[in-house]
Amino acid sequence: MYTIRTATVNDVETIRQIADQTWWVTYGPILEKEQIDFMLSEIYSASKIRAQIENNVQIYLLLLEDEQPVAFASYSPREENVEIYKLHKLYCLPQIQGKGYGKILINQVAQKTMDAGKDVLELNVNRYNNAKTFYEKMGFAIAYEEDIAIGPYWMNDYVMRKELTS
């Protein structure tokens, strides 16, 4: 049994814990330890997540299984093009992967995007991340490649896009 709710600032540490547990399993095989440490501290600092939630920069959805938080997603309109929504983050604890929660969260974000009157959802995925196959199964296709500097490191991503229909 699962529920989904919008995260609040009271959920910042929960989001950080899920990210920390998931990132090492996901990125350990493809990134150096120093880069993972840096990116976790940069992207998932408590102050950054708190500010994103307080200022509605990103909306975080928390998925709970038997009332325990096990996955989250965050999304917003793209800064450069508010006609396109972006799925910024989607992480499920390693021990619950395969239960369909990632699909449930993507579908929830897609519905919120359509509720806002928009019909395009994008995301970035590391070009070597196995999640790319999952996103393709969910109807996303590669739109282009993008290399983004984060401190001294690079995120080598595909930007994937999905056209939404109600």
Image: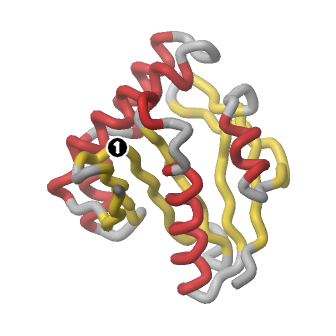
Secondary structure, mark 1, is strand
- The residue sitting at 61% across, 34% down in the picture is 149
Display coloring:
secondary structure
Which residue in the structure is indicated by mark 1? 70
Relative to residue 166, is residue 102 depicted above or below?
Answer: above
Q: Is residue 78 visible?
A: no
Q: Quadrant of residue 158?
A: top right
Q: Position of residue 134 (x, y in %)?
A: 70, 43
> What amino acid is labelled 1 in the image?
Val
Farthest front residue in view: 1
In this rendering, the answer to whether 4 lies above or below 21 is: below
The one of 65 and 28 positioned closer to us in this rendering: 65
Q: Residue at x 61, y 82 (%)?
A: 114
Quadrant in the rendering for residue 5: bottom left
Residue 108 % position (x, y): 51, 68
The structure residue drawn at horizontal position 77% and vertical position 56%, both measured from the top left corner, is: 140
Q: Nearer the viewer, residue 76 or 60?
A: 60
Q: Quadrant of the N terminus?
A: bottom left
Q: How many marks?
A: 1
Q: Residues within 10 Å of mark 1 (few under 14, many from 20)?
A: many
Rendered residue at 71%/48% (across/down): 135
